Image (cartoon, coloured by chain):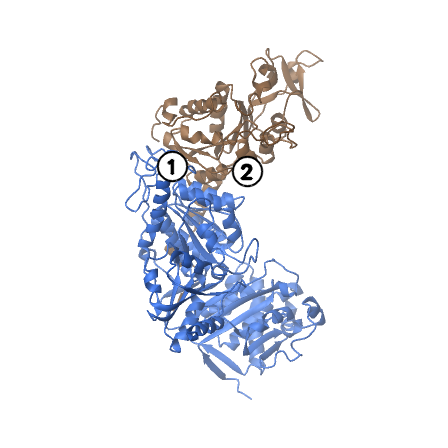
């Protein structure tokens, strides 16, 4: 038998917390990752919850999960398979078992494995007894009874007591990962600052879990995840949605403009609206409109009035905003549209992730209305791309669509805190009073000047009708329409001159170029790195600037024998590349399961392409 | 405060040729607005006219102020954004019965409910004019139009009833044939802090000529209209010999001196009540039983959305320790690695 002090150092570890929605699994996951950050680990998280707030208790549909990937190593994804699965009921175990690594550890609340629970989960077998868990390390902890016993004297009702079960698990994991229990206690004290009696109960349970783990012999091995050494400085753990909100606010501050958000709640974008609505102290105005259409139109009104304006939504909401996008485009007003993509079409899979709105954002409008499209690639860089989208919008007087998705928006990662003084400048081109203003006079970048109501002498009218070049009055002249169509398109095409260089990782020429866009960056990077380490001549480039494409795109593509475009749709970016750069042949790797890629499946595909002659 | 220049109507005439049909009621509304603007104490550069789609929505092109010609039905949302982005602006929303009652119905009720300080002029000609004569949500039941060759089978909206249902704080009605009254009413709308809805009964000379004739005709108007003024008796008729009384839950027309009714029985108009029950009854009056109400039917003073928004921001700014983005970025759980 191993001794209790058998501690192993690991490079990285993936933990999945799963239980009923309402079991506090999201909280446990956040708590675990926050403590990891304090301990200096790199990390990425990804919640996986049902679309119902409270799906029927104990059912597979009601399983709520939260995956955390922490490491001494650099972490780019929330991880493929879990090293440790926490399952608070049979449904959670059933749903997640296939995502646990062979030989992994499974922690269950053994009290929840009852005949009644099997019935609710529609299971005809007990996984704890039928041999399904052979080959795993299984920790059967009587969590419910332990919690009830621990808090017996407190007078709390059993419903309240059962809500502390997640802290028993946290305590157990703190032992398993050789963590100072004090850090988890501090988290609880902060979280329940306004309810000291609840905080106290949770801390008691946390310690009970820790002590339980210390006592039982099944936990013969514990783990140490050393601090990441590539990171130094001040960090925080941030979700993509929060980072997006902060990026928009940072851009407003940097530009000297007031900020206005017109939005309507929609999963998974709502958190951006809620986050922005907290920051009245920074003069942030948020308007929860009556629908998606009013959300964008109010933002267009605010942009006309001289604010840095944005609207936030997800797929179906973007569809509703299409007509207004055309209005923002033809009036050439700055506006950021954030689309946090989810599974579609229609209502689709609201809480799941997908990259299926690319073609909608590129072409989903009447008339010729090319709008720049960009995409963030990690939870923390949502900040940078929200900032970049805002800068692009006001400096080029155009609406800009920024894509994130459920994976980025709800996922989190470590973010090195920027200093506002180091952020790029943003320079809106605003008309001075009495400037003989002509709304559609353009500068060398074909950008028009922005005249704000309230400023004397620049009174003018804009609108959705075609306008005369320069003066801006309504015009139905055929030649003028052709000219305006061309000028608007050229203006947008010129934006790529201001992009940073498109980065290529690994071999700068070779057998295979792996191409991704947006949120697939992390998992593609890990898969690419592993294949490259085996000696393949492989490069990887991930696009954040989708339309217009970076100027050097063709120069990059021509240096590889094969190009493989990987995306979470049926080939939208690949088809767009075929349309934009038809001189290249594109292999595709697609997944439309409303789940992120896994490193393992990508590696397999890369190797298959590399081996094929 | 800087002195406001004494403007005249000409200051608000743009260089654009007005393209409405000859004889259209919109001309008199445009003139009334241009005559109103010099009298409301607002600098020209602080005026913004916002519109949707339809004949009425060409309005911003003809007024020499800031203007935004939006898309169908969305003027209320656009105007809301303009006002909230810069509450110092005087925002005017020009819309029609198709634009506001059909495609923009949702935005219409929510703008009134929120009480954003916007002056909303609703041109009601009971027809789609720009698309050439289809019935609108205000077209009377049974009317034959391009899309109802056998008569409409839809019950129409009364904009005033919707406004009351949406808890609108200001509702007035004017007729396009009376520029003097229209101007008086527009001035009241401009003065009101909150969403001020003015329904203008407007004639479409081409597709719905004389739709309001019974109300506006010189011969019948004294008997068919009642011009309501706050604090005054509800009287009408050529000699002001008729008045309104409450009969149970209904309004009733009476002749003073007949059936035992005296001047003392006649209702006095109070536009400023919080309770909008009487305003609702007045707004829905229709011929032949009752005269159609014009004038300011409701003007209830309460907080506006824009004032509350600004108040909330200034309160939070006063107490929060977060003064800029650097403060925010470094607040809460941060880790030194």
User: Relative to A366, is B68 above or below?
Assistant: above
User: Relative to A340, is A472 above or below?
Assistant: above
Which mark is drawn over residue B149?
A: none
Q: How far across and how far down the image is residue B42, in percent?
A: 40, 29
Q: How far across and how far down the image is residue A550, in percent?
A: 35, 57
Q: How far across and how far down the image is residue A613, in percent?
A: 41, 74
Q: Nearer the viewer, residue A32 or A185?
A: A32
State the SS at label 2: helix
Q: CA distance from mark 2 to mark 1?
A: 30 Å
Chain drawn in blue: A
Q: Nearer the viewer, mark 2 or mark 1?
A: 1
Q: Nearer the viewer, residue A326 or A9?
A: A326
Tint applied to chain B in the drawing:
brown
The subunit carrying tag 1 is: A
Q: Is residue A373 visible?
A: yes
In which quadrant will I find the N terminus of chain B? Answer: top left
Q: Is residue A375 visible?
A: no
User: Relative to B121, is A74 above or below?
Assistant: below
Which mark is drawn over residue A478?
A: 1
Q: Are marks 2 and 1 on the same chain?
A: no
Which mark is drawn over residue B103?
A: 2
């Amino acid at each position: 038998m191993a001794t209790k002090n058998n501690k192993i150092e690991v490079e990285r570890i993936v933990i999945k917390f799963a239980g009923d929605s309402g079991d506090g699994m999201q909280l446990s996951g956040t708590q675990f990752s926050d403590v990891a950050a304090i301990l200096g680990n790199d990390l990425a998280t990804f919640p996986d919850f049902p679309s119902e707030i409270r799906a029927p208790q104990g059912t597979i549909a009601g399983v709520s999960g939260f995956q955390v990937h922490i490491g001494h190593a650099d972490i780019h994804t929330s991880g493929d398979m879990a090293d440790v699965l926490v399952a608070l009921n049979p449904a959670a175990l059933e749903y997640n078992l296939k995502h646990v690594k062979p030989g992994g550890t499974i922690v269950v609340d053994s009290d929840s494995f009852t005949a009644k629970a099997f019935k609710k989960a529609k299971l005809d077998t007990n996984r704890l007894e039928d041999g399904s868990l052979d080959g795993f390390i299984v920790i059967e902890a009587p969590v419910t009874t332990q919690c009830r016993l621990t808090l017996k004297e407190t007078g709390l009702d059993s419903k309240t007591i059962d809500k502390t079960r997640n802290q028993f698990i946290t305590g157990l994991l703190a032992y398993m990962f050789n963590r100072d229990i004090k850090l988890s206690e501090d988290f609880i004290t902060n979280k329940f600052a306004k309810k000291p009696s609840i905080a106290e109960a949770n801390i008691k349970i946390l310690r009970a879990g820790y002590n339980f783990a210390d006592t039982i012999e099944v936990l013969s091995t514990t783990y140490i995840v050393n601090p990441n050494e590539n990171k130094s400085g001040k960090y925080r753990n941030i979700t993509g949605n929060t980072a997006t909100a902060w990026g928009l606010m940072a851009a407003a501050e940097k530009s000297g403009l007031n900020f206005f958000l017109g939005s309507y709640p929609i999963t998974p974008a709502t958190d951006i609206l809620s986050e922005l609505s907290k920051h009245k102290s920074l003069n942030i105005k948020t308007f929860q409109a009556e629908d998606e259409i009013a959300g964008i139109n109010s933002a267009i009104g605010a942009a006309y009035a001289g604010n840095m304006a944005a609207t936030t939504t997800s797929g179906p909401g973007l569809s509703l905003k299409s007509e207004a996008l055309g209005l923002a485009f033809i009036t050439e007003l700055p506006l950021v549209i954030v689309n946090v993509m989810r599974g579609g079409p229609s209502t689709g899979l609201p809480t799941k992730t997908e990259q299926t709105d690319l073609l909608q954002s590129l072409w989903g409008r009447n008339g010729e209305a090319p709008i720049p499209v960009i995409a963030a690639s990690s939870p923390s860089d949502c900040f940078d791309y929200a900032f970049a989208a805002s800068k692009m919008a006001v400096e080029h007087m155009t609406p800009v669509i920024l894509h994130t998705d459920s994976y980025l928006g709800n996922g989190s990662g470590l973010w090195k805190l920027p200093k506002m003084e180091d952020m790029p400048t943003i320079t809106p081109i605003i008309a001075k009073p009495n400037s003989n203003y002509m709304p559609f006079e353009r500068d060398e970048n074909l950008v028009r000047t922005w005249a704000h109501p309230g400023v004397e002498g620049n009174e003018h009218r804009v609108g959705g009708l075609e306008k005369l070049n320069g003066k801006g009055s309504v015009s139905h002249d055929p030649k003028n329409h052709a000219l305006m169509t061309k000028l608007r398109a050229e203006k947008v095409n010129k934006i790529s001159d201001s992009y940073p260089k498109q980065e290529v990782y690994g071999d700068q020429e070779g057998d295979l170029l792996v191409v991704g866009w947006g949120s697939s960056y992390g998992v593609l990077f890990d898969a690419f790195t592993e294949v490259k380490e085996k000696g393949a001549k492989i490069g990887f480039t991930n696009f954040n600037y989708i339309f217009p494409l970076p100027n050097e795109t063709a120069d990059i593509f021509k240096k590889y024998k094969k190009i493989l475009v990987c995306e979470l749709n049926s080939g939208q970016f690949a088809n767009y590349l075929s349309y934009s750069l038809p001189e290249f042949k594109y292999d595709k790797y697609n997944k439309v399961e409303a789940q992120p890629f896994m490193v393992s499946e990508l590696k397999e595909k890369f190797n298959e392409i590399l081996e094929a002659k | 405060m800087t002195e406001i220049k004494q403007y005249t109507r000409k200051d608000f005439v743009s260089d654009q040729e007005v393209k409405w049909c000859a004889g259209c009621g919109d001309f008199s509304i445009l003139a009334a607005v241009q005559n109103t603007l010099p009298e409301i104490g607002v600098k020209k550069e602080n005026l913004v006219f916002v519109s949707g789609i339809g004949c009425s929505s060409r309005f911003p092109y003809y007024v020499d102020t800031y203007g935004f010609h939006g898309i169908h039905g969305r003027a209320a949302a656009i105007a809301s954004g303009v006002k909230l982005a810069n509450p110092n602006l005087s925002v005017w929303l020009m819309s029609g019965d198709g634009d506001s009652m059909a495609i923009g119905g949702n935005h219409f009720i929510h703008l009134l409910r929120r009480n954003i300080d916007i002056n909303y002029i609703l041109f009601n000609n009971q027809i789609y004019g720009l698309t050439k004569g289809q019935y609108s949500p205000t077209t009377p039941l049974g009317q034959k139009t391009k899309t109802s060759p056998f008569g409409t089978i839809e019950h129409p909206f009364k904009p005033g009833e919707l406004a009351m249902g949406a808890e609108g704080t200001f509702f007035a009605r004017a007729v396009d044939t009376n520029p003097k009254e229209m101007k008086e009413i527009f001035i009241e709308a401009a003065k009101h802090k909150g969403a001020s809805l003015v329904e203008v009964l407007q004639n479409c000379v081409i597709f719905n000529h004389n739709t309001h004739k019974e109300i506006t005709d010189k011969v019948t108007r004294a008997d068919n209209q009642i011009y309501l003024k706050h604090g005054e008796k509800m009287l009408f008729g050529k000699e002001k010999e008729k008045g309104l009384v409450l009969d149970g839950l209904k309004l009733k027309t009476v002749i003073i001196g007949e059936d035992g009714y005296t001047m003392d029985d006649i209702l006095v108009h109070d536009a400023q009540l919080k309770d909008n029950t009487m305003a609702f009854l007045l707004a829905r009056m229709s011929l032949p039983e009752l005269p159609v109400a014009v004038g300011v039917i409701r003007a209830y003073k309460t907080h506006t959305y824009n004032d509350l928004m600004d108040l909330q921001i200034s309160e939070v700014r006063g107490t929060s320790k977060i003064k800029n983005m650097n403060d925010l970025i470094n607040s809460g759980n941060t880790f030194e690695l």
